Amino acid sequence: MNKTSIGERLKYQRQVKGYSQEELAHRTNVTVRTIQRIEKEEVSPHLNTIKLLAVALEIEVDDLIPLENPKEETVKKKWLLLMHATPLIGIFLPLLNVLIPLFIWIHKREDNPIYNKHGIKVINFQITVLILAILSFVSLVTIEKWGFFIFISVVPICIAIIVFNIIYVVQKNKCYYPFSIPFLRLKKNNIYSLVLGFLVLLGSCSAPKQETVERLDGSLITKDSITKKIDQLMTDAEIYGMAVTIFNDNQPVYEKVFGYKDYPNKIVLTDSTNVYGASFSKAVFGVLVMKLVEQGVIALDTPLESYLPKKIYEYEPQTRWHDDFSSLKEDSLYSKITARMCLDHTTGFKNYRWFEDDYKLRVHWEPGTQFGYSGEGFIYLQVVLEKLTGKGLEELAQEIIFEPLGMKNSAYEWKSKFNEDFALGHDEHEEALKKDKDNEPRGGGTLETTPKDYTKFLTAVLHQKIISEASYNEIFSPHIKIRNEKQFGEGTSITTNAYDDINLGYGLGWGYFETPYGKAVFKEGHGSGFVHHSVLFPETGKGIMIMTNFERGNSIFKELLDIALKDVYTPWKWENYIPYQQLDTRDKKQ
């Protein structure tokens, strides 16, 4: 409607409804004389009079008040500008961005529907801004990389929207606030809207809840505290590269990487950086083997030699060294070795053949009778499986483990794509070591993975994926009791009962011990400047994975396990996880 005066608008609306001046007067408390004078533009009606007429005509007040009335425009814009502009004070005094327009709205909403409409839109937007500000702060401390950009972008975007609406309301008497949550609505009861808005406002003022990790004993620790402690431990122990994942309820709840993949050149480590897995390989291989057991390819307690048409030492080697078993021709014990013995380290082989004086592989005791950590046992089992299935280890691992779990950056051999982002190992003096890229696939120690990928694997283990519950129970049972004082070195020949209280033993590819919170299963890795540790508590859904690319990395494992999970049960002396405080300074740096 293009009428420009109240009189013309009133006459037009009255005639549209078919009312005479007398009928309209009858429907209101406004006299016929007053209506006549308004229509003849002899008076400027009071706002309350206009409201009464609008109600009787079932129209909005805006339909009677001419927008071009200079006096009305001045009054209206003054209050509208206050509503839209005062939230900028919230930049300096938080909450005032909501409280000031709220007070203006309460004061003016009955005077004119446009105040009510604009006020509701401003308040809804400003409450939404408060919530976004809180969420952006949470993202800053919880989301790496993008969290910072989210945090710094919220305020400028909101200011831009406010400035746009200040200009828009001056020019068009209109406003537009995108992304607003409709806490207050035009059609709802005003009291209900105010109460709802007030409750939301109180909620927006609350401090963001700090994210926590639940430890074995039920105590909670904030993620910030864990991060600060790891930073402190790494600084004190002079360890400059690490990835940590902590599990609660069978899910990763803390994932963070620290430091560098190449310390001398200060190149940052990420969760997608390729990291040499070392003996983490054995945990993956254990699950792979159990899948083949389920498929009937092999049985755990059948001597491996019986699966082959000829003696293992009669096969022509296909690799540089690991499938050369020619030295077993004179050995009378190896024929008793089973898959179970290979996985629980009771074959009698030394860790690797180069630990023998003559570099020849041999069995040192009756297979199955005592623990002796051996990568050679895993190699023997791998070679037999490859001959049985006609598939190499890498093909089997991709088919059974990596592809089903989405571990796209994991392999038992070096892939060209790993060249884009890989970590170097570092020795005791922070010197980077040359990356070994020509390893042939071996189930005991050539895994290439990333912190993100290996977290996927451990998550799958906690959820009992890939293999059945019965198979996991088989893996996570003590098949041999451990009485060695140490896992490696001179202590392996010393017998002790120091670990009887935790029933330390070995399962199938995983170590085993018991705690007041149920059984625990663990696997470590060490080689080429990389030192790793993982331990899961399947009955509680808790666990931790630690990956480092510094030789001294395990010097903070004991304290980190305690801080992150209250794990004071891991046999750190048996693992030789000597705390950095106890290391002789000459061993740390010469």
Image: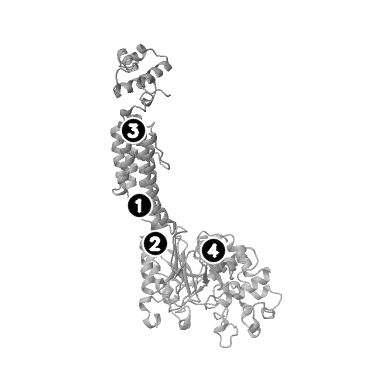
Task: For the residues labelled 3 and 2, say whether their Cβ atoms are less than 8 Å apart.
Answer: no
Q: Which of marks 4 and 3 is nearer the N terminus?
A: 3
Q: Name the residue under label 3.
A: 115
Q: What element carries label 3?
A: helix
Q: How far apart are marks 4 and 3 (CA)?
A: 67 Å
Q: What element carries label 4?
A: helix
Q: Which of marks 3 and 2 is nearer the N terminus?
A: 3
Q: Mark 2 points at which residue?
A: 215
Give coordinates of residue 536: x percent, y percent: 47, 65
Residue 507 makes an appearance in the image? no
Q: What residue type is labelled 4?
A: Tyr
Q: Which amino acid does label 1 sit on?
A: Pro
Count of labels in the image? 4
The tag on residue 208 is 1
Q: Which of marks 3 and 1 is nearer the N terminus?
A: 3
Give coordinates of residue 502: x percent, y percent: 43, 71
The tag on residue 472 is 4
Q: Which of 296 and 45 is in front in this view?
A: 45
Give coordinates of residue 338: x percent, y percent: 61, 74
Tell me where residue 230 sits by quadrant: bottom left
Image quarter of the N terminus? top left
Image quarter of the C terminus? bottom left
Q: Which amino acid does label 2 sit on?
A: Arg
Q: What residue type is labelled 3?
A: Tyr
Task: For the residues labelled 4 and 3, say whether their Cβ atoms are less than 8 Å apart.
Answer: no
Q: What element carries label 1?
A: loop
Q: Residues within 10 Å of mark 4 (few under 14, many from 20)?
A: many
Give coordinates of residue 201: x percent, y percent: 33, 43
Q: Earlier in the sequence, mark 2 or mark 4?
A: 2
